[in-house]
Image: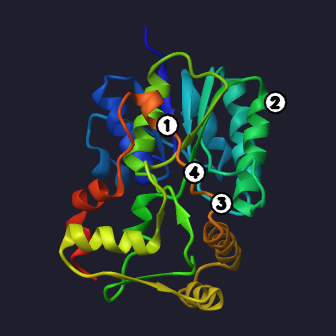
Amino acid sequence: MAKTILVTGATGKVGRDVVRLLSERGAPIRVGVRDQAKAREQFGDDIVLVTFDFENEDSFASALDGVAKVFLLTPSRPNQVEVTNAFVDAAKRAGVCHIVKLSVIGIDDSPQFTFGEWHAANEQHIRESGLAFTFLRPNSFMQNFITFFSPRNGAIHLPWGSGKASFVDTRDIASVAAEVLMSDGHDEKIYTLTGPAALGIADVARILSEAVRREFKYVDVPESAARDAMLQVGMPTWAVDGLMELHAINKQNHWSAVTSDIERVTGSPATDFAQFARDHAERFRVG
């Protein structure tokens, strides 16, 4: 008999597709959400929802009852290490067998960075728990160019200089997660998930221009200007500091390597940026 899979972080870019893919494959899934009424509008009537909040340990037991596997996606926040580790402890007590954790690229590399240190601490706690695990370490999302780095007035503004990164499509991350959750042979594996090519922001602008048939350019902004812009829109200082660390790392080409882990797990090649741009062209025709 199939065992229940709990999906956390299900209302975000990756989590939504994990839920969809598992549902399409007939997996018995449970989706942990803070607001069931709001989530029901997103997931429809066929998905089992349970009230769950990483900030509320009292919600852990009911969410984990009868669960064999967990897709663990925690929001970035200053107390990420503490709340995630508390959840892992609860998962062990509940009899969970396997945790598939969405982590981040580069946490074993130098230079160290705050978000990476948080994920590394969580990974270590999972290792020490004795639970079976799989860690997914994706590079920067292509979808960030729809949300965080979206073009304004025909330009992408980032402090990356000529730095490049092997951007990955969140749909591919979800495909890997679903395959790992539904199949055997992934215990104690770490998958570094990248797109098929390293691109600079000027490359991204060119590819978007070709897909949308509208000219985009790259504006390399000073780091001080990028920081000020984020603070001015109300982002908390801890988040700004963490993002500026990521920008600096990417400016230095630290995450430009390409892996074949997506194809190795799913059997399909990673989505290239041109395909991503075509699939989301309507999102780039405004703004």
C-alpha separation, residue under disc 2 versus residue under disc 4: 29 Å
Disc 2 crowd, CA 10 A, few/some/many (<14, 14-19, 20+): few
Q: Are marks 2 and 1 in contact (CB under 8 Å)?
A: no
Identify the residue at image location x=61%, y=24%.
Answer: 98
Identify residue type, mark 3: His
Identify the residue at image location x=60%, y=42%.
Answer: 59
C-alpha separation, residue under disc 3 versus residue under disc 2: 29 Å
Task: From this view, report whether residue 96 is shown above or below residue 210.
Answer: above
State the residue position of label 1: 260
Foreground residue, 86 or 159?
Answer: 159
Task: Residue 70 in the image: state x and y as whole percent.
Answer: 56, 31
**Could you say which disc has been placed on residue 128 in the image?**
2
Helix, strand or loop at mark 1: loop
Identify residue type, mark 2: Glu
**Could you say which disc has been placed on residue 254 in the image?**
3
Q: Residue furthest top?
A: 1
Task: From this view, report whether residue 265 is shown above or below residue 37.
Answer: above
Disc 4 crowd, CA 10 A, few/some/many (<14, 14-19, 20+): some
Q: Are marks 2 and 4 in contact (CB under 8 Å)?
A: no
Q: Are marks 4 and 3 in contact (CB under 8 Å)?
A: no
C-alpha separation, residue under disc 1 versus residue under disc 3: 18 Å
